[in-house]
Amino acid sequence: MGRLLFCKEDVMEQILEKINAFVWGAPALLGILGVGIYLTIRTGFSQLRLLPKAIRTFLSAFTAKGEKSGTVRPYQALCTALAATVGTGNLAGVAGAMAIGGPGAIFWMWICAILGMILKLAEATLAVRYRTRDEKGEIVGGPMYMIKKGLHKRWHFLAGLYCFFGVVAAFGVGSATQVNAVIGGVNQVICAWGGRETLQGNLIMGIMLSLTMCAILLGGMKKIGRAAESLVPFASAGYLLLGVGVLIARSQMLPEALSAIITGAFTPRAVTGGAIGSVFTVLRIGVSRGVFTNEAGMGTAGIAHAAADVEHPVQQGLMGIVEVFLDTIVICTMTALVILVSGVPIPYGTDVGVTLTTQAFAAIYGDWVAVVLAAALCCFAIATVLGWGLYGARCAQFLFGTNVWRRFVYLQGIVIVIAAVLKTGTVWLLSEIVNGIMAIPNLIALLALTPELVRLLKDYRLRFCTSP
C-alpha cells in the first residue's frame, strides 16, 4: 500500500513538473522580464536613480512614530512585506536554484531583482494611490483595488481572478513551503543529535506553528506589523552575520565563486561539468526562484504597503525598492556565496533545499550551526506565514466580505498542520505554478496604469527631490 502511494506521488510530481515547465516557459519569463524592462524605460530607470534615496528613507523610517487610524508606520508595512518575502526561499530556494540551474542561476536572480525593484516600486506606489477603507474602517489596497478603481469595468474580472489565486498561493507558497522547510531544518538537527524523523514529530511541529500563526494573525494588521518588525530584522541580521563570518574565513574563494556565477549564467556546462547544459534552463530557474523569493510581479507586497501612513504614494514605493534589494541582492547573494566558498559539493540535478545551505555553514562553524539556522528558519517561516496570511485574508475579504477573516485564518492553520507531512518537491512545484499564474492579472494592471505611475513619479520628484 505504501509503495502504491509512493508511486502515485511520483506520478503527480512528474505531472506538476510538466505544468511548471509550461507556466514558467517563454511566455511567463517574457511577461515578467518584459514588463520590468518596459517600466524601467518608461520611468527612466527610477529603481536605480531612486535607490540611494530609498535606502535613506528606509533608515529614517526606524525612528518614525505614530500612525493614523487604520494604518501602520511605513517601516511596519515594509517589515510585513519583507516577512512574506524573506523566508525559506532565501535559504532553501537559493540552494535549490543552484542545484537545478547551477551557480549561473544566481546571476539571473540578480537581473530579476533589478527589474523586480521597478515592479515593487510600481506595485507599492499604485497600491497606496488606489487604496480605500473597508467596512471596519481599515485601509485596504493591492492589485485587486488597482484593477477595480483604476481600470475599465470590462477588466474587473481580473481582480476576482487575482484574489482567487491569492488565496490558493497563501496556502501554498505562504504556508506549505514554509512548514516544509522548517520541518526539514529541525529534523536535520534531530538526526545530527542521534534522533530520527517521525510522522508524530512532524505533526507536533506543524500544530505548534499553526497555533502561533493563528494567535498573531487574528489580531489584525497592526499585530501582524508589530510581530513582523520584531522577527524580520532579528532573524535577517543574525543570518547575515553568520554569512559574513563564512566569507571572511574563505575570502580567498570569493573571486572563484563570483566567476562561477557569471560564467555559469552563459556557459553552464563549463561550471557544472556538463550536468546542466541549457542556458534557458538556468535562466528559467533563476527567474522563477527569484520571483518566488522577492515576489516581484505578483503584486502581493502592495497589500501590505497600502496600509502605510505616508504623505505621497511614491514614498512607500521607495520601500518596495528596498524590499527587493534586501531580499535578493543582499540575503540571497549571501546564501549563494556561502555555498560556493564552503567547498561543499553541489548535487546538480536535485532540489536539495535547506540541507545544502546547512551543510555549507557547518563546513565552517561545525554541526552546532544547524541549530542556529533552524531557529532562523523558524523565525523566517513564521514571519512569512504571517505576511501571506494577511495577503490571503485580504484576498478572501475582497471575494467574500470582511467577515471572512477569522474563517480564513482557521483554514490556513489546518493547511499548515497538513503541510507538515507533505513531500517537499510537490509543494515547491505547486507554489511555483501558482506564482506564475497569479502574476498575470497584476502585470496587466501595471501596464495599464503605467501613465499614472509616471505622473506620480514626476510629481514626487518635483515636490520632494532637490533636482527633479
Image (cartoon, helix red, strand yellow):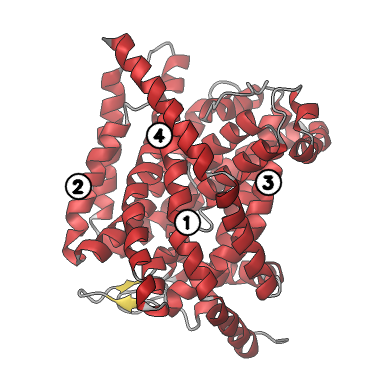
Q: How much space separates mark 2 and mark 4, taking CA atoms?
A: 20 Å
Residue kind at label 4, given as amino acid type: Val
Q: Earlier in the sequence, mark 4 or mark 3?
A: 3
Residue 33: give x, y in percent of width and height: 63, 56
Q: Is residue 63 visible?
A: no
Q: In the structure shown, which secondary structural element does the residue marked by tag 1 occupy? A: helix
Residue mark closest to the camera, 2 vs 1: 1
Residue at left offset 26%, top offset 59% = 396
What label sits on residue 427 in the rendered view?
Answer: 4
Q: Is residue 373 above or below residue 61?
A: above
For disc 2, the marked residue is 410
Q: Quadrant of the C terminus?
A: bottom right
User: What kind of element bears circle 2?
Assistant: helix
Q: Amino acid at mark 1?
A: Ala
Left or right, 301 with reference to 257: left
Q: Which tag is nearer the camera, tag 1 or tag 4? A: 1
Count of picture labels: 4
Q: Where is residue 457 shown, x and y percent of the image?
A: 60, 81
Q: Secondary structure at mark 4?
A: helix
- Say whether disc 2 or disc 4 marks the residue closer to the N-terminus: 2
Name the residue beneath numbered marker 1: 439
